[in-house]
Image (cartoon, coloured by chain):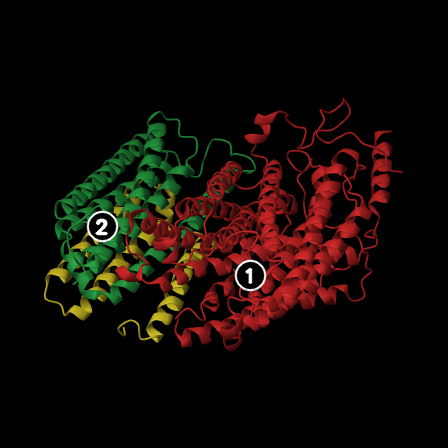
Chain colours: A red, B yellow, C green
């Protein structure tokens, strides 16, 4: 049934059609491309490499933490490890991830147009991202920094003996990539929707990308300015944030977190959008509460800007400000919860198909709820006084970022892999990897909640012996997780050469991206699409679920019939 | 009407006259700024007055030179969003400082 | 007799279907970018505000050392350049290329004059020992902080102006050779230039007029 098909990268034989992959071969055609699909592939390679680097840092940290004393690395080295892990993961994996990969690839396809509004700006964004990444890699190879990814002053400006300036430059540069990508997505969504693609027919993934882009545009400039001030203070010794010279470290924290809190919504919103796509397809049901889910994305983007002080409860900020930020942090949880309720309502009375993307979607819902509920715990000012700077916080954000965002990314990657590459991945391996990731993840991070609550501080390379059992469990889990992440890397690459052809719509899913061949032609659509149907019309007769193999066979039959 | 003749000939007499008049108003406001600074205005009023005049100049530049007055709703929404978000940054940050008593009350 | 602005020859760049669609997308794109710039400079203004409320005497003393004459001249030059820029945009819509070239040249000239005067002012501050970290000869750390803000804010502004001058120069050359393919570019550059002027309109009272 499944035959070895020619690689999508090979030069086409006579009868093979032109796809974005084989239209123009050679390095120049890839490095100077303005095709959003090729740029998405370039980004995917880059962020996968950064994820690997950040993951190695994490693993080294977990090795050290197997035993209470700091016996594997010095404390100074450990500080550099967790700083590098945070910086690489936050700015060079999590922030760009879904928007620059799945977003870049799918946004024009989903709204029915040929490319983004500013294709050359898109390419420029990629190279800016790379340059920023190279600065940061250079800094890491020179030993990195020991300030944590948060660069609190005056330690980062006046006391740290590490390459702070170089790292700050890397992130400063990367910020422009973020702003320009967001700008591109917003203008594209407003101006290039196909005829009939009204705002209330847009896929929810597009709504989430739009909300994410708003945050990128409005929050990142404040980080840019803050890093400039930090860099100036570091380079010239001026006292902007140095209390000895009249500066205020809390001002740094306000400026830093004004960006960095909305940044976490940059990271999670696209993931939330992916889940809406997966839930509908694999329960064969129209989404419940479309308007509520779309609106909640915008609400999260807006309210996310009002809560940054919850990172500063114990910083010296006024207690009244703390109260206000605490209340607002509870409010911002509401739109996220609205999404979860609507997904559950969508599942109800649906026909569920437990394929790999759906396993990731289910994992997401459970882990995101845990992350979200523990978020409410740390948002409670009185409780946070005790758990701030402990492993409780570390576990909370890893549940959201890894259990949530990374899970959604993998789910989306599997769901759209046939569209992007024209190949089907091996379903058995997909399911095995998803389960292993889920087990490894929980083994890694669940003990961290407990030990954090019991008082284990974060960013410590040496700790009191009573926490060792939790650390051992956590390191065991991270080993399972590390191996589990290698599985998709392996079988997805394998499928490029040996996977069966996918056909245009292996999942029989709704959405314009599934109406075009897999992989798509360079201009996305052979004919400009016109939209008439509501989104997620899974209740219609012809939207029965098909296994991808059947869908491939059906597509092949149709193709041979049309050639007669 | 005004807007018709303007869009019919964007570089015609009416259109250019409007720009010249706006520039004249801006220079008048600049003169007012200097006057307010030089004259013995009570210190507490000096800064708010200066900023208010700056805001008036800004309004003219935005509405006329940047043509926000004649732009689409979407463009005006984009401009308003930038301004509103800046307000959020100021309000919540200064709220912390003021409620700590760290700064002299406004 | 200039052609009506409604006829826009030239083909749109992909993926746009019409020049009008492309122009409105470019306009929206520039306004969205200006929203991000508002937050960039805005964060600077916020930091300035916090420290000004903390150290009002140092701030007033620092502003006294800024020349009112130079500051006012700078503001006047910039306002004038906004006028020439607005006229250039209007001329481009009427496709009056000679006027466009001349007005862009005037804008560039005024912009260069602004930068020159600014650097002259910096030189004066150097003479008086008011350049933080490099040549600051007064013992007040809060005064130092004022001048840190003075230099960094005006340098950031000058950097943006220089980019604007560069963009105008490119457009001016294209207009002169009657090879301006993207007419929307004049409008979007104009928007950027006016924004940079806006920033200065607020820098002027905050750096020169503090009592």
**Residue found at x 59% / y 50%:** A60
For the N terminus of chain A, the image quarter is top right
The residue carrying pointer 2 sits among few (fewer than 14), some (14 to 19) or many (20 or more) residues within 10 Å by Cα, namely: many
The subunit letter for the residue under badge 1 reads: A
Could you say which quadrant of the image residue A244 lies in?
bottom left
For the residues carrying marks 1 and 2, which lies nearer the camera in this image?
A: 2
Q: Nearer the viewer, residue A108 or C207?
A: C207
Residue A411's disc number = none
Q: Is residue A541 visible?
A: yes
In the image: residue A288, left or right of residue A151: right
Could you say which quadrant of the image residue A7 lies in?
top right
Q: Secondary structure at mark 2?
A: loop
Pointer 1 residue? A298
**Residue A29 point in image, percent of width and height:** 59, 27
**Residue found at x 22% / y 45%:** C134
Pointer 2 residue? C132
Callouts 1 and 2 close, C-beta under 8 Å: no
For the C terminus of chain A, the image quarter is top right
Structural distance between the alpha carbons of marks 1 and 2 = 44 Å
Q: Nearer the viewer, residue A456 or A339?
A: A456
**Residue found at x 64% / y 45%:** A106
Could you say which quadrant of the image residue B60 lies in?
bottom left
The residue carrying pointer 1 sits among few (fewer than 14), some (14 to 19) or many (20 or more) residues within 10 Å by Cα, namely: many
**Residue B23 point in image, percent of width and height:** 23, 49
In the image: residue A4, left or right of residue A72: right
């Amino acid at each position: 049934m499944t035959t070895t098909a020619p690689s999508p990268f090979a030069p086409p034989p006579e009868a093979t059609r032109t796809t974005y992959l084989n239209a123009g071969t050679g390095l120049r055609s890839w490095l100077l491309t303005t095709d959003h699909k090729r740029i998405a592939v370039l980004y995917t390679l880059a962020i996968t490499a950064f994820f690997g680097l950040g993951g190695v840092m994490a693993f080294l940290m977990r090795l050290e933490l197997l035993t209470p004393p700091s016996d594997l690395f010095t404390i100074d080295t450990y500080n550099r490890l967790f700083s590098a892990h945070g910086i690489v993961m936050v700015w060079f994996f999590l922030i760009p991830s879904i928007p620059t990969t799945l977003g870049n690839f799918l946004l024009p396809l989903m709204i029915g147009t040929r490319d983004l509004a500013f294709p050359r700006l898109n390419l420029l964004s990629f190279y800016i991202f790379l340059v920023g990444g190279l600065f940061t890699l250079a800094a890491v190879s020179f030993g990195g920094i020991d300030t944590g990814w948060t660069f609190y002053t005056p330690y980062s400006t006046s006391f740290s003996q590490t390459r702070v300036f170089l790292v700050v430059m890397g992130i400063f540069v990367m910020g422009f990539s973020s702003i320009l990508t967001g700008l591109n997505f917003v203008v594209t969504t407003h101006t290039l929707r196909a005829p009939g693609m009204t705002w209330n027919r847009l896929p929810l993934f597009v709504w989430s990308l739009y909300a994410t882009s708003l945050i990128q545009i409005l929050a990142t400039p404040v980080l840019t300015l803050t890093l400039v001030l930090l860099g100036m203070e570091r380079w010239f010794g001026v006292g902007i944030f140095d209390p000895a010279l009249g500066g205020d470290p809390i001002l740094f924290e306000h400026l830093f977190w004004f960006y960095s809190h909305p940044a976490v919504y940059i990271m999670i919103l696209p993931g939330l959008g992916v889940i809406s796509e997966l839930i509908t397809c694999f329960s064969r049901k129209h989404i419940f509460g479309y308007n509520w889910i779309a609106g909640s994305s915008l609400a999260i983007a807006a309210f996310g800007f009002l809560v940054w002080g919850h990172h500063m409860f114990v910083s010296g900020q006024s207690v009244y400000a703390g109260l206000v930020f605490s209340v607002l942090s509870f409010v911002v949880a509401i739109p996220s919860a609205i999404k979860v309720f609507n997904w559950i309502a969508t599942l109800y009375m649906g026909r569920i198909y437990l394929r790999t993307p759906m396993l990731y979607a289910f994992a997401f819902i459970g882990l995101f709820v845990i992350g979200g509920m523990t978020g409410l715990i740390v948002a409670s000012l009185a409780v946070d006084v005790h758990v701030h700077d402990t492993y409780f916080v570390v576990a909370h954000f890893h549940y959201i970022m890894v259990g949530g965002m990374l899970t959604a990314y993998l789910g989306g990657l599997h769901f759209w892999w046939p569209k992007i590459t024209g190949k089907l991945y091996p379903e058995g391996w997909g399911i095995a990897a998803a389960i292993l990731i889920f087990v490894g993840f929980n083994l890694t991070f669940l003990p961290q909640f407990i030990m954090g609550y019991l008082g284990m501080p974060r960013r410590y390379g040496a700790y009191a012996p009573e926490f060792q059992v939790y650390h051992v469990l956590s390191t065991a889990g991270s080993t399972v997780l590390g191996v589990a992440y290698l599985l998709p890397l392996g079988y997805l690459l394998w499928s490029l050469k040996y996977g069966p052809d996918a056909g245009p719509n292996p999942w029989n899913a709704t959405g314009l991206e599934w109406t075009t061949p897999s992989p798509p032609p360079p201009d996305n659509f052979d004919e400009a699409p016109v939209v008439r149907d509501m989104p997620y019309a899974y209740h219609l007769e012809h939207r029965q679920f098909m296994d991808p193999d059947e869908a491939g066979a059906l597509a092949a039959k149709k193709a041979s019939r049309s050639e007669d | 009407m005004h807007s018709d003749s303007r869009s019919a000939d964007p570089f015609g007499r009416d259109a250019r006259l409007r720009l010249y008049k706006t520039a004249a108003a801006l220079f008048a406001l600049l003169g007012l700024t200097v006057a307010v600074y030089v004259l013995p205005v009570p210190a507490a009023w000096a800064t708010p007055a200066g900023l208010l005049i700056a805001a008036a100049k800004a309004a003219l530049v935005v509405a006329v030179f940047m043509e926000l007055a004649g732009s689409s709703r979407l463009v005006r929404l984009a401009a308003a969003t930038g301004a509103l978000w800046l307000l959020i940054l100021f309000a919540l940050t200064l709220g912390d400082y003021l409620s700590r008593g760290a700064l002299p009350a406004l | 007799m200039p052609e009506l602005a409604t006829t826009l020859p030239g083909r749109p760049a992909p993926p746009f279907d019409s020049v009008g669609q492309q122009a409105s997308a470019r306009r929206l794109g520039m306004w969205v970018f200006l929203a991000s710039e508002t937050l960039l400079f805005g964060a600077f203004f916020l930091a300035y505000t916090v420290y000004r409320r903390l150290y009002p005497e140092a701030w007033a003393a620092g502003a006294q050392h800024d020349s009112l004459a130079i500051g006012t001249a700078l503001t006047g030059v910039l306002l004038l350049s906004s006028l020439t820029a607005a006229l250039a945009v209007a001329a481009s819509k009427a496709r009056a290329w000679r006027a466009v070239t001349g007005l862009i040249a005037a804008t560039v000239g005024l912009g260069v004059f602004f930068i020159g005067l600014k650097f002259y002012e910096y030189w004066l501050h150097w003479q008086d020992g008011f350049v933080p970290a490099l040549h600051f000869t007064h013992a007040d750390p809060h005064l130092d902080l004022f001048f840190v803000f003075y230099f960094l804010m005006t340098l950031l502004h000058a950097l943006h102006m220089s980019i604007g001058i560069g963009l105008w120069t490119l457009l001016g050359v294209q207009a002169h050779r009657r090879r301006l393919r993207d007419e929307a570019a004049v409008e979007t550059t104009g928007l950027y230039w006016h924004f940079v002027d806006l920033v200065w309109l607020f820098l002027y009272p905050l750096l020169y007029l503090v009592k």
